[in-house]
């Protein structure tokens, strides 16, 4: 019993010392206004400007019902959603200790990301600097503009470095949508398999509950066979969210890939007559390719999990995944019911 009480007394003493050390750093000299990093009403945000101490800078702005990056490209929804949640949820964990404060401030002055948040009337809501992680990588050093004290920030429910959410790569902010149509928006889908023309088809939505499918190869005929309307309507749902894995416009071997023939051409036309296209190319195997050999042990030439594609009126070269796009790569036979 006495040993237990002794241990308890030691724990209380240690806790008291820890509290005193933190309290000493959180003394009444700290300005509460210098701890207000979060923005509760993110719906009021109209613009976010971010820049490093070099030449990189990003401006994210609301335009109508979506966000634009640098007034050039539509922004990725998942990226801006994560940033807005971060702006709302960041909380002060504790002030940077006096012993480390000067060094942290020096780093914030030379190696940090400046963040300025404006409302929809272009009035400044918040400005602060995002620095590096704490030694345990569980917090992020930040300081409000014109403040005297730096703080360690955290996000409730998240353990890690929040600074990675304030990234400055314009390409990484770009929307990666290749096709995004709800079934009722689609008038026509055309898939042309250049290496297997017998699989090519055009799907036409005649009415809400009626789809017609015809071969692009004139030598084929499916006359007398009924279209599987259930599968055809399910197929249209596959175009609801088809995104690229990433942009590859700076890929070193881009020209050699584009010099080859695309093995697939996809075109989707909506009811306004607007058509979006994607030309899909095989991606050569690299050292990072998952499967280097086929079932017989022969070395494979092309990646089975990923392809390259040319999109946005042939302006952008992207990488796409078979996991997402493989479901639309079906032959025309799949649309017809087998004769009983």
Image (cartoon, grey):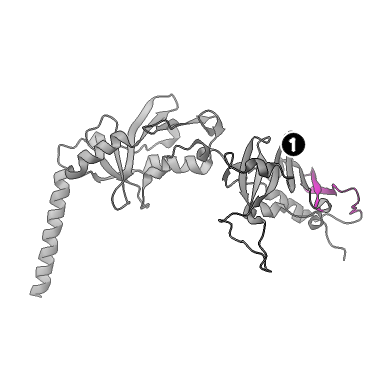
Q: Is residue 181 visible?
A: no
Decide if residue 15 is on the left or right side of residue 87: left
Residue beneath the point at 32% across and 51% down? 137
Q: Quadrant of residue 85?
A: top left
Quarter of the image with the N terminus in it: bottom left
Q: Quadrant of residue 65?
A: top right
Pointer 1 residue? 271
Q: Where does residue 123 sit, x and y in percent of width and height?
A: 39, 24
Decide if residue 300 is on the left or right side of residue 114: right
Indicate whether 330 appears above or below 38: below
Assess whether residue 202 is covered by the magenta stretch.
Answer: yes
Q: Where does residue 279 sit, x and y in percent of width and height?
A: 71, 43
Q: Where does residue 51 sit, x and y in percent of width and height?
A: 40, 32
Quarter of the image with the C terminus in it: bottom right
Please state the extent of the stretch shown in magenta in the rendering: 199-223
Dot 1 crowding, Cα within 10 Å, few <14, some 14–19, many 20+:
few
Q: Circle 1 sits in a helix, a strand or a loop, which is it? A: loop
Indicate whether 243 appears above or below 302: above
In the foreground, 282 or 15: 282
In the foreground, 111 or 259: 259
Assess whether residue 266 is covered by the magenta stretch.
Answer: no
Q: Where does residue 197 sit, x and y in percent of width and height?
A: 82, 50
Decide if residue 150 is on the left or right side of residue 29: right
Residue beneath the point at 45% across and 35% down? 43
Decide if residue 173 is on the left or right side of residue 313: left
Q: Is residue 86 visible?
A: yes
């Amino acid at each position: 019993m006495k040993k237990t009480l002794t241990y308890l007394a030691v724990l209380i003493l240690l806790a008291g010392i820890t509290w005193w050390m933190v309290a000493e750093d959180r003394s009444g000299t700290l300005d509460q206004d210098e701890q207000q990093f979060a923005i509760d009403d993110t719906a009021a945000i109209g613009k976010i400007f971010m820049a490093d101490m070099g030449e990189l800078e990003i401006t994210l702005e609301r335009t109508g019902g979506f966000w634009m990056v640098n007034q050039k490209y539509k922004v990725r929804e998942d990226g801006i959603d994560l940033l807005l949640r971060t702006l709302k949820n960041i909380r002060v964990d504790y002030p940077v200790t006096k012993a480390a404060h000067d060094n942290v401030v020096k780093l914030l002055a030379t190696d940090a990301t400046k963040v300025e948040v404006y409302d929809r009337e272009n009035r400044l809501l918040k400005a602060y600097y995002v620095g590096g992680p704490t030694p345990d990588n569980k917090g992020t050093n930040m300081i409000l503009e014109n403040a005297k004290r730096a703080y360690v920030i955290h996000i409730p429910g998240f353990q890690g470095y929040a600074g990675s959410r304030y990234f400055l790569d314009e390409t990484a902010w770009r929307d990666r949508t290749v096709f995004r149509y709800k079934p009722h928006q689609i008038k026509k889908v055309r898939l042309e398999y250049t290496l297997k023309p017998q699989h090519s088809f055009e799907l036409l939505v005649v009415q809400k509950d009626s789809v017609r499918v015809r071969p692009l190869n004139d030598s084929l005929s499916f006359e007398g066979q009924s279209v599987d309307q259930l599968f055809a309507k399910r197929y249209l749902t596959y175009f609801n969210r088809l995104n690229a894995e990433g942009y590859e416009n700076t890929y070193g071997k881009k020209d050699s890939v584009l010099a080859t023939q695309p093995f697939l051409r996809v075109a989707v036309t909506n009811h306004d007559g607007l058509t979006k296209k994607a030309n899909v190319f095989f991606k050569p195997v690299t050292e990072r390719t998952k499967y280097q050999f086929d079932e017989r042990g022969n070395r494979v030439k092309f990646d089975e999990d990923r392809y390259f594609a040319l999109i946005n009126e042939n302006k952008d070269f992207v990488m796409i995944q078979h996991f997402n796009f493989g479901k639309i790569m079906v032959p025309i036979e799949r649309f017809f019911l087998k004769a009983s």
